[in-house]
Amino acid sequence: MNYTINKRNSVYKISVGIIVLLVGFGNFSCKKIDNLQSNRLATETTNWKTLEDAKANLLSIYGLMRSASVADNGHWLMGDLRQGDFQITNRADLKAIVNGQLNSSYPVINRLTNWRRFYAAINAASLYIERSGEILKLDPRYTELNNRVDVAQARMIRAFAYFYMSRIWGDVPLVTSSHDGDFVQLSRSSQAKVLAFATNELLVAGQIVPFRYGGTDPILPGTYHSNSWTGWNGILFTRLSCYVMLAHIAAWQGNYLDAANYAKFVLDNQASQNKDGSFGLAYLDMASLTENSSNSPFAYKRATLIVGFPFEAGNGLLTANGHLEQLTLASPFIPKTQPEMFVPKDTINKVFTDPFDLRFGIDPVTKSYRTNYFYNYQSEQPIFNKVKAIYTGQTASNVALFSSSMVFSRLEEISLLRAEALAVLGDREGAITALNQATNLRGVTYLSSSKVPVIDAIFAERRRELMGEGWRWYDIIRYNKIKNTNNIFTTKNGVAMTFRQFEAAGGIYWPVSQEVINANPSITQNPYWN
């Protein structure tokens, strides 16, 4: 059992200018990007001249997408609260999300329902695709291959943004070119069209980007933008990142044959990351999952972060907002009397049923319990301490700073997605193999003789393994699509609704901000929220 808390952090260097760029791009809306002059660090006439411009502008797109996903802790509030395992202590706005009251007038909810932060990243990506080639004529250090790889990454980020938004709002405007100033007021495109665009973008990019940057990868050997593999490890989207995204888009569409094949590509090629003397792609042991050991995707920019965004401590990337810990930790981890959200004891007992589970289990003889996931389990508000990348330095106040990554996918997650796909396709043995591959280091095994349906076991494992990683609501949606039962899923104004009725009314999605609708009258509200 592990009762220790390891708060180690490591560092990496990203230009402070990227943070400034986040502000510069942050005023995009569906009516205008901004009524004022552009706030970019450099004007458009001087921003596409050198190799250094190419690098800075590419990293700014990553920064914008990272900011879009974690602003106001949106990744976790949107993914973990609706019908999730967390309860709220005293914040009325978070309780509204838990209760499905997503059109409540709270500032946080108003900001979360506004999609313009994602279009800031999309606009920056489109601008990069259109303009970065100009550097080829001006700086001989910038090669055709370098530009193709850079543009492919911009296309990947743009595709990821569209998939991410589609899970939240369903139909969204599909914008495929940059706009600085007046912006054409587009209506919402169908989710099918948006995801088809994202899929095509990823399929093209997946043939260009390497498995590793700045190393011995045959696609792009040698240093990349003056950095070696250790400098880029866990920061940039790789070829495996591309196929993780493709697998998730396919699964969201119910196309499980493609989902299984894309996930298989990732699993079959995981060894491609384990070269050049760096920490490679691997299944996480408990120390890496919960104690910030050297291969942790939460605390370090490692290859184990297949898709996600790091926040390592070194050069000012510590923040108080945009981290799960801000919501889940309290004393003795940080100077805070109680967490803002917690997993109740009854839910813990319901979810973690195996006493040998290394994440949480109660010894049937001694009654002692593991603290890897939960601290002070016996209290009314157990602290969810699975993720705890906390800055250990002294601060001037009681505000804690965190450096944990936003982890979208890691090896366990994509293995469970492949298990899900194989189960839906009727390959029970293949699904069990993939499931047990994901749980091999957790002390639990699914036996072929088990009477629990394998699809139920897979989603139960996703609930345990991915708790606090922003997956719960989206897993509930996919699970109910697969099961397709006529059971009551929710009620609205006292009227019971099955999942299919709820889905058909647009209830699985968030409402669109009234600010967006006011700025662009061609945008319609999701019908469930009218």
Image: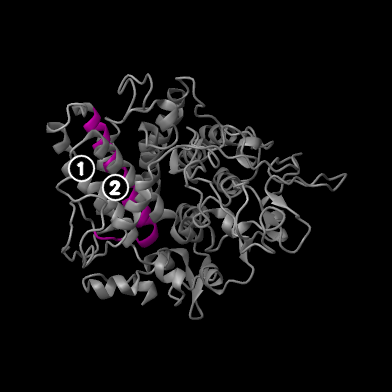
Q: Give the numbered dot on residue 129.
A: 1
What is the secondary structure assignment of the residue under circle 2?
Answer: helix
Q: Quadrant where the N terminus lies? A: top right
Residue 255 visible in the picture: no
Determine whether label 1 and label 2 are within 8 Å by CB: yes
Say if 89 sits above or below 393 in the image: below
Q: Residue at x 58, y 50 (%)?
A: 467
Q: Amino acid at mark 1?
A: Ile
Instruction: Specify start and end residues of the magenta stretch as a single range.
Output: 146-173
In the current view of this chain or complex, which residue is farthest to the left? 137
User: Relative to 11, is 529 on the left or the right?
Assistant: left
In the current view of this chain or complex, which residue is farthest to the right? 366
Q: Residue at x 44, y 43 (%)?
A: 308
Q: Residue at x 25, y 70 (%)?
A: 523
Looking at the rendering, which quadrant does residue 521 occupy?
bottom left
Percent x, y of residue 369: 78, 47
Q: What residue is pinned by disc 2?
A: 158
Q: Residue at x 18, y 58 (%)?
A: 180
Q: How is the image coloured?
A: one colour
Magenta span includes 56: no
